[in-house]
Image (cartoon, rainbow, N blue to C red):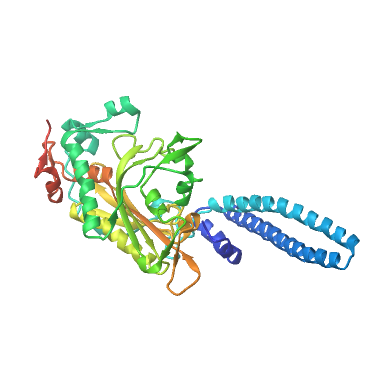
Amino acid sequence: MLDIKWIRENPKALVDALVKRSWSSDEAQATVDDLLLKDEQRRAHLGELQVRQERRNAASKEIGNAMRSGDSVLAEQLKLEVADIKSFIQNGEARERELDKALEDALAVIPNVPFDDVPVGADENDNVEVRKVGAIKQRPNWVKEHFEIGEALGLMDFERAAKLSGSRFTVLKGKLARLERAIGQFMLDLHTTEHGYQEVIPPLLVRDEVLFGTNQLPKFEDDLFFVPHGDGRLGLIPTAEVPLTNLVREEILAQEKLPLRMTALTPCFRSEAGSAGRDTRGMLRQHQFYKVELVSITDADSSIAEHERMTQCAEEVLKRLELPFRTVTLCTGDMGFGARKTYDIEVWLPGQNAYREISSCSVCGDFQARRMDARYRVKDEKATRFVHTLNGSGTAVGRALIAVLENYQNEDGSVTIPEVLRPYMGGAAKIEAN
């Protein structure tokens, strides 16, 4: 959530930022004007409440003076005035809550402001390549896509998954199931032992306010799954970013304890409401998938450097797996709602003859912290500041499995297991058809 004080002082900057994010000029201006109007109404009402409260206090003293001087008529007049003021204040406090909610609701749907160095563009075609790692081999004519490889091995079953749950689910079996588990364990071990992240096993079901804290709600409600719980509901996490980041909600941290770096391997659940017709075959876009998430909580001065570090940690996964990839900076029109800057890491899939996203690493500034009320205190300072939050995939386990299958496939249909994963596979060097 953006700071209304900053918006008040920089309305044109927000209009320009929204236009960069592909809003029309008229829509952006109308939105900012509406925010400023709601803010002015709220502040005017608070000012009137303060005036009335001050008058109530003064009148209460005047009642005592009037009674001591024996002026009962004045005392009764003042008592009536105080009663009217109390009624106004009581109604005014309810109105204050209404104005607070109206402003908060309006702010909740405004995306974050991109950094100045983020390329301006409309969609993924305007993203900018930062680096490319690993050579792409010449594509022989026998190369297959991952679902063709998995089905031929007899270890990837979409038909039975559909019988159980419908489309966009997969059943993995045997060595392929073990390979996916191996990939996740390898990533966790790398990030905890070499990159300094603390492993966390978080809840997979969370409250609405937690989803609001990391900006899944209200804008992306249709992409979530919910289950009834008591008189309300709980949401299945779309990413471990949600519970990990919210671990610091409504807390004040000591600056010297920052950064906090956390990682988790969890199932993730997404309805893919806006992806009809996209990647309908195979495992690329599933309702349920595993992902290793990276989350950092930093102070304001460290977040940009932490973003570069986090991206390098995610890239290291693909380097160890010896998978070709490239890193791109997302343009303003392709960037996520809560991000100020995002790097996407795209792994090479020879079956598709294309790079596909396997990790997004984003720096959010204090956008999420304001929604969570997560702060830190600088030593010897009384005032607190909002933390900065970062999140990234370290990486998507299912997509890493896809990349391994396609990059390590052999002409005879077998799949060579990358060297770094063999200790997790009981020393096996290859997966072959049963």
At 24% from the left and 35% from the top, the residue drawn is: 147
User: Is 5 or 137 nearer to us in this picture?
Assistant: 5
Name the side, left or right, on which 90 lies relative to 376. right
Residue most extreme to the bottom: 380
| x and y, in percent, of residue 236 in the image | 40, 40
At 90% from the left and 60% from the top, the residue drawn is: 73
Judge whether residue 168 can be spotted in this image: yes
Toward which corner of the image does residue 248 lie, by quadrant? Answer: bottom left
Name the side, left or right, on which 156 lies relative to 222. left
Total numbered labels placed on residues in the image: 0
Judge whether residue 362 can be spotted in this image: no
User: Is 362 or 87 nearer to us in this picture?
Assistant: 87
Toward which corner of the image does residue 143 lie, by quadrant? Answer: top left
Name the side, left or right, on which 37 lies relative to 208. right
| x and y, in percent, of residue 264 in the image | 30, 50
Quarter of the figure with the C terminus? top left
At 15% from the left and 41% from the top, the residue drawn is: 409
Name the side, left or right, on which 291 lies relative to 409. right
399, above or below 386, in the image: above
| x and y, in percent, of residue 240 in the image | 35, 48
| x and y, in percent, of residue 197 in the image | 28, 58
